[in-house]
Image (cartoon, rainbow, N blue to C red):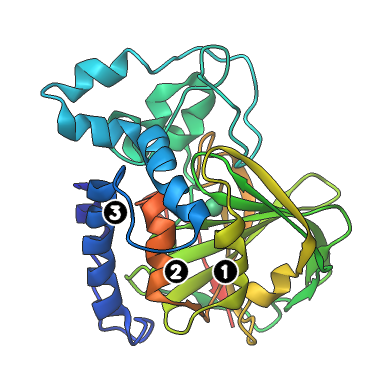
Amino acid sequence: MKTFLLLAPVCGLAFCPPAFAEDYSGANSISDEAAALAGMEPASGDEHHDDAHSEAAADDYGAPLKAEAHADPLEDIVVDAPTHVEEHVEIAVEHKEEARHGPAHWGYVGVEGADQWGGLDEAYHACAAGVKQSPINIHEFMRDDAMGDITLSYQTVPLSVVNNGHTIQVNYPAGSTASVGDRTFELLQYHFHTPSEHYLAGAPYAMEVHFVHKNDAGKLGVFGVMMKLGAENAMIQNIWKNAPAEKGEHVVADLLLNAADLFPADKSDYTYHGSLTTPPCSEGVHWHVLENPIEISQKQLIAFQTMFPVNARPVQPMGDRVVKGK
Ligand SMILES: [Zn+2]
């Protein structure tokens, strides 16, 4: 999977998570394995994931899997890629496109991969032409002691988990807010990427969770929390086991969760101006990437990668932007 060439970590710096070198190289082979195994019956695990795995991988990562199976993958896939645009894509909400009348289908590898997004659809222009794109490699920052702290006022709510074909996303009802200094944003949803999209000091983590918020002016604020391998995470366990096997939503009325439980105790962060990391790559997003990771088990990582072997956009050029921290 050539994508990994872009993701090869260079560990050894201060930020490099202790278990990372080992974990990540493990993750590479795990991903390859997950892709290769798509369609096979897993040995164990809960029912949702056993199903999820083959369906989602065959559907959403159909391109790469097909590409390996066909002599001429380009011919096969280019025909499928519509360029027609009629609708705006809401953040991270994928339409049930068999995309004739919606935005172009996109993915993470091959001819629908991240380096092709800008050309797949006019609406995705910013993916190629933008100069404040996300994610980035955060390897230096400007100290700003006046930077506001992150404060969460999230409510505990019934789980509403969506498989949108690109990730597992948990939707949040109105009424939960986060503030950074004097700015307040309302939580809309959170979702997951593997490996992490942001790098800290040159290296990715095993996964990253994005908490997507909007303020009254319509500006997006996204918090990125790194996930490293370690102890099993009870909250993640609840989300994974209820994630729909195919595209769709699963509401579990009697399972009450609070998104705040996916944050580290110390919410120190780096902040910069960036974009959505998925098409249409719209800019004007206030990013806050937390310094400290949370933990998930290797089994939980594999469970996610079985559905989504790779769903991370490579890091983008910094340009003249500055990251602030304290
Ligand atoms: Zn994201």
Secondary structure state at the residue bearing disc 2: helix
Residue at the spot 25% in from the left edge and 49% down from the top edge: 37
The residue that mark 3 highlights is: 34
Residue type at the position of mark 1: Ile
Q: Residue at x 50, y 39 (%)?
A: 165
Q: Is mark 2 within 8 Å of ligand 1?
A: no
Q: Position of residue 14 (x, y in %)?
A: 35, 87
Disc 2/disc 3 C-alpha distance (Å): 13 Å
Number of other residues with Cα within 10 Å of mark 3, as a class: few under 14, some 14 to 19, many 20 or more? many
Residue 287 lies in quadrant: bottom right
Q: Distance between the Cα atoms at labels 1 and 2?
A: 8 Å
Query: Which residue extends farthest left?
Result: 71
Residue 236 has which mark?
1
Q: Which mark is residue 300?
A: 2
Between disc 2 and disc 3, whose residue precedes? Answer: 3
Q: Residues at badges 2 and 3 in contact (C-beta under 8 Å)? A: no
Q: Residue at x 62, y 14 (%)?
A: 86
Along the line of sight, the residue nearer the viewer: 125 or 231: 231
Q: Amino acid at mark 2?
A: Gln
* In the image: residue 322, left or right of residue 9: right
